[in-house]
Image (cartoon, rainbow, N blue to C red):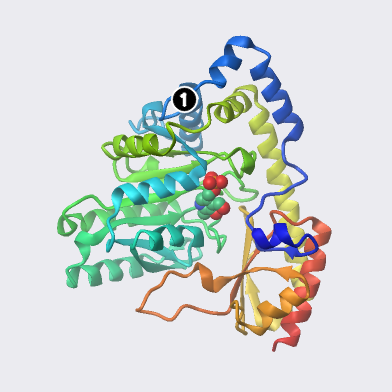
Amino acid sequence: MQLTLDRPTLISLAAGFTDHASLPVMETTRLLRSILMEPKMARRSLQYGSTAGDPALRKLTIERLRNLDSSLDSPIYTPENVLITHGSQQLLYLVTECLCDPGDIVLVEDPTYFVYLGILQSHGIASRGIKLQADGLDLKELGRVLDDLKQRGLLPRVKMLYLVSYFQNPSGITTSLEKKRAALELLKKYEKDAGHPIYLLEDAAYRELRFTGAEVPSGLSISSDRVIYAGTYSKPFATGIRVGYGVVPEPLLTVLTRVKGNHDFGTSHLLQQILRAALESGAYEQHLALLQSRYSAKARVLTRAMEMEFPSDAIQWEKPAGGLYVWAKTDVPTGRKSKVFNGALEENVLYVPGEVCYPEDPTRRAPRNTMRLSFGGASKSEMREGIRRLGKVLRAGR
Ligand SMILES: Cc1ncc(COP(=O)(O)O)c(C=O)c1O
């Protein structure tokens, strides 16, 4: 992100920036005006709120989620289980800090969201990677890893499985409901030996950026006491507003709320009110529909350019059904020290080298030939030009 900001001529297919031109400027101006023009609401919004978050936003959030999940009867879908956070990133941090000690182990997808790997590393927490298939986690491997940890007496150190379940960053893969159910059953099976609950931390950051395929319910629709759901209003509305949320079972919720209180007493009240007003007025749904069709068109432009410009026998990828990313596998190294990465930089184009997305795992050698390309921030013409330059580098690098 920093390189993109520092070097304006660079075409970045790397950063997770969202589409710049469609950011909801007019909508946010109207929403802010409606909040500030009403004196009582204005004063309330400019005052501290509660640590857990604005009650109206918590209610709107959980009602929306229950509708998305088509789940009517689970006790988890109550505003009391919702914690509003500073982006979903804060929720991921809080959960990890509260649940894990140095030396613990978190199971992650292989590859996974590399910023989360940073949270683990900074807390001295180890990770074990679970490979992905077209419909999500490789369950056989999950079983094998849990067995191996059991045999080595390490299960008491396993606290959770972190899953980016929708249009995963970086691979674009969505985990099916069946796989979430099977994964939860597997985790439960090993709890006795672990001596404590093993949670599923479901990161749904890209869930709402779906442009094809059916809605997949979240793990909350399966379990009301083992799933921690991390949601966000960043990607579907405005990343700069930085409002996210968690749906968290007790007793973890109380601990997270206390620790969040120590951090910040609660997410910015004014910014929460913008989201509340957006959801209540319908502006949120309207904007989301616009984003979905916009990203669908941008994904088509990116993959069309890849079809035309990349050496077809040497690079593979799947067309995305949502999210912001295309994950490409090549037959040449793509890491930070590779000819391809440095050639791309010389051509003023940037991608995320896939090597940063793999957890440190001594039991396997991480692939070094993958790259994450984003259709979020770059414009259509930048994507076409960026892919043309990258195609040139890829052909030269072989
Ligand atoms: C997988 C994933 N989870 C969480 C986040 C955090 O997003 P935010 O804090 O804006 O909700 C991101 C941001 O890029 C992400 O890619």
Q: Which residue is mark 1?
A: 59
Q: Quadrant of the C terminus?
A: bottom right
Question: Could you classify mark 1 by the number of other residues whose Cα lies within 10 Å: few (under 14), some (14-19), or many (20 or more)?
Answer: some
Picture coordinates of residue 393 (x, y %)? 75, 80
Which picture quadrant has residue 100?
Answer: bottom left
Q: SS of the residue at dot 1?
A: helix
Q: Name the spot of residue 87 as percent of width and height, x first.
A: 52, 42
Give me the residue at 64% from left, 19% from top: 35
Residue 250 in the image, given as x and y percentages of width and height: 28, 36
Residue 76 position (above or below residue 295): above
**Quadrant of the drawing holding the N terminus:** bottom right
Is 308 on the left-hand or right-hand side of 339?
Answer: right
Seen at 33% across and 63% down, the residue is 124
- Kindly identify the residue that appears in the image at 51 percent across and 37 percent down: 68
Q: Amino acid at mark 1?
A: Lys
Residue 269 locus on image (x, y percent):
53, 27
- On the picture, is 283 further left or further right than 92? right
Q: Is mark 1 within 8 Å of ligand 1?
A: no
